[in-house]
Image (cartoon, rainbow, N blue to C red):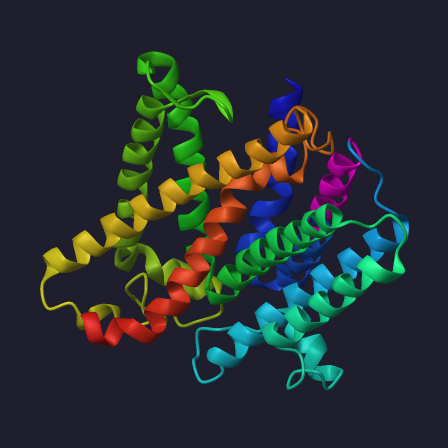
């Protein structure tokens, strides 16, 4: 019952925030809060071995937010000439502060590098091992949450597609695993996960994801009106790259299937990554911020990892797609 009530509250808050354009500032504020929460969860996990000083925690959270902002700023610059992109509030804030031309991922990485390499000298009892844990936290949280925010800036359809894949993969991996699971996939990380469950989850997620993308022209006018447009009909990847360059419908179908399978697999890898970190530090859940579901990273681990992969995929495709159509 507790799990159901928590899931209901999460849905009632996040679904309108993701879908309704007027609530974008609310959504992006929630993303920043969740990102900070995820950092705190990782720090509390590390405390099982060694307490991380408060000052280092604050520095790490600030640098994570710098990385988060720099990634969104970079993606915004790449999409400056397109009509589909809508700048996140973080990017608008950078523009207001006259920092748009300064803050790039390269600058953010240099700042992170300088600050934490220097901490080996100036912070007592701060070791190379501690440095690695901080780096992992900043990159894991900053990149993943920036990717999720960027996908929403591209359009709500990408968020629906992503969460449909990750939720269906997770749900049906459990169903198929309980029914048919005989071969353990990664017993040293997650003893309950099986290859049968993984394949079943990916199969169902691929069917659902394929339907969302392939049938999008039939219901795209609704989302266009929701975003304030005239209600035009469009393909799923229109305005992102030259999706219509495919000369045969079969090519488009294969492309959608491969993309969806790839994201489903990445979602399962993301789940295993989060599980591996917990197992290394001997904890069951990252926190209890969501009763019955655990912490931020427990609830969104698959979606966050898949969002980062999907974002890289889109950025690469924007450059390469005209040549492979």
What secondary structure predominates along the stretch shown in magenta? helix
Q: Is residue 62 above or below residue 140?
A: below
* Residue at the spot 25% in from the left edge and 50% down from the top edge: 258
Magenta residues? Answer: 35-48
Rendered location of residue 182, percent (x, y): 33, 13
Would residue 215 be seen by someone viewing this image from the given angle?
no
Rendered location of residue 270, percent (x, y): 49, 41
- Classify residue 61 as left or right of residue 53: left
* Residue at the spot 32% in from the left edge and 35% down from the top edge: 202
Residue 232, picture quadrant:
bottom left
Rendered location of residue 104, percent (x, y): 61, 77
- Classify residue 251 as left or right of residue 223: left
Q: Is residue 43 magenta?
A: yes
State how many labels appear.
0
* Residue at the spot 60% in from the left edge and 46% down from the top edge: 14
Residue 324, picture quadrant:
bottom left
Q: Does the magenta stretch include residue 136?
A: no
The C terminus, quarter of image: bottom left
Rendered location of residue 151, percent (x, y): 49, 60
Would residue 218 be seen by someone viewing this image from the given angle?
yes
The N terminus, quarter of image: top right
Q: Foreground: 178 or 102?
A: 102
Q: In this view, does 253 lie above or below 321?
A: above
- Classify residue 127 as left or right of residue 241: right
Q: Foreground: 126 or 47?
A: 126
* Residue at the spot 81% in from the left edge and 37% down from the top edge: 50
């Amino acid at each position: 019952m507790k799990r159901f009530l928590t899931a209901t509250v999460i849905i009632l808050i996040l679904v309108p925030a993701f879908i309704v354009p007027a609530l974008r500032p609310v959504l992006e504020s929630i993303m920043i809060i969740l990102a900070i929460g995820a950092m705190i969860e990782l720090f509390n996990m590390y405390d099982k071995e060694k307490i991380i000083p408060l000052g280092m925690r604050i520095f790490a959270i600030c640098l994570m937010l710098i990385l988060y902002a720099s990634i969104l700023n970079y993606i915004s610059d790449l999409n400056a000439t397109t009509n589909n992109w809508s700048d996140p509030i973080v990017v608008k804030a950078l523009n207001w502060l006259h920092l748009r031309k300064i803050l790039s991922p390269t600058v953010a990485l240099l700042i992170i590098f300088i600050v934490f390499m220097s901490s080996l000298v100036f912070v007592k009892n701060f070791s190379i091992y501690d440095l690695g844990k901080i780096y992992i936290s900043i990159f894991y949280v900053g990149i993943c949450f920036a990717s999720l925010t960027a996908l929403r800036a591209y359009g709500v359809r990408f968020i629906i597609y992503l969460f449909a894949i990750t939720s269906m993969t997770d749900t049906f991996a459990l169903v198929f695993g309980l029914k048919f699971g005989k071969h353990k996939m990664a017993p040293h990380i997650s003893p309950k996960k099986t290859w049968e469950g993984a394949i079943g989850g990916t199969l169902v997620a691929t069917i659902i994801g394929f339907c969302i993308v392939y049938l999008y022209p039939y219901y795209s006018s609704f989302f266009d009106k929701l975003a304030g447009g005239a209600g035009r009909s469009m393909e799923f990847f229109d305005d992102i790259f030259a999706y219509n360059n495919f000369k045969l419908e079969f090519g488009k179908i294969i492309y959608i299937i491969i993309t969806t399978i790839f994201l489903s697999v990445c979602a399962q890898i993301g789940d295993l990554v989060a599980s591996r970190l917990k197992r290394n530090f001997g904890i069951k859940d990252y926190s209890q911020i969501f009763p019955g579901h655990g912490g931020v990273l427990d609830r969104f681990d698959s979606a966050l990892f898949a969002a980062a992969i999907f974002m890289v995929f889109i950025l690469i495709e924007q450059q390469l797609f005209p040549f492979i159509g």
